[in-house]
Image (spheres, helix red, strand yellow):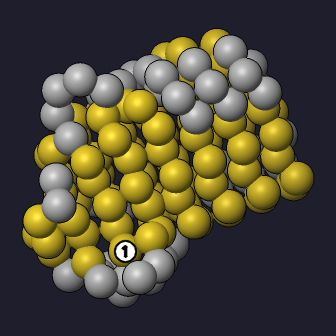
Amino acid sequence: MNTWFKNVFAGAQGTVSVNGRSYRGRDIRVTDEGVFVDGAKVDSTPTTPRLDITVQGSVQSLETASGDVTVQGDVTGSVKTMSGDVTVSGAVGGSISTMSGDVRAADVAGSVSTMSGDIRR
């Protein structure tokens, strides 16, 4: 199973929008087998692994294979994407890394890296 996106919310449930469709739960994953919320399959696989992710709430960590990621809250751990822009409106307790994409975050406790893109703090 290929995982294209996964995150775990810090504390209570949060909301994630994947390509315009919203999902609410504590553990949200998008794989080649479908969209899973708290372990239960709730939707079919998106037609493309290119995802546009918006997280409303604070998360422990966030990983995606490709796609732009926006977190409207804090990240207590790290953010990692292979290809896509990362924007965090709150604080990041760990690091942010992307192979190809811009990074926008004001408060990052760890390192910030991108192979191809701009870093704005």
Most foreground residue, 20 or 93? 93
Where is residue 31 shown, x and y percent of the image?
Answer: 37, 74
| Image quadrant where residue 34 sits | bottom left
Quadrant for the C terminus, please.
Answer: top right
Q: Is residue 28 left or right of residue 22?
A: right
Whether residue 106 can be seen here = no
Q: Is residue 72 left or right of residue 120?
A: left
Q: Is residue 68 above or below residue 83?
A: above
- Amino acid type, residue under disc 1 in the picture: Thr
Q: Is residue 8 above or below residue 33?
A: above
| Image quadrant where residue 66 sits | bottom right
| Circle count | 1
Where is residue 112 shown, x and y percent of the image?
Answer: 78, 32
The residue at 40%/22% (across/down) is 73
The residue at 26%/48% (across/down) is 27
Whether residue 54 can be seen here = yes
Mark 1 sits on what residue? 31
Q: Is residue 28 above or below residue 32?
A: above
The residue at 41%/82% (across/down) is 1
How many C-alpha atoms fall within 10 Å of the one at disc 1: few (<14), some, or many (≥20)? some
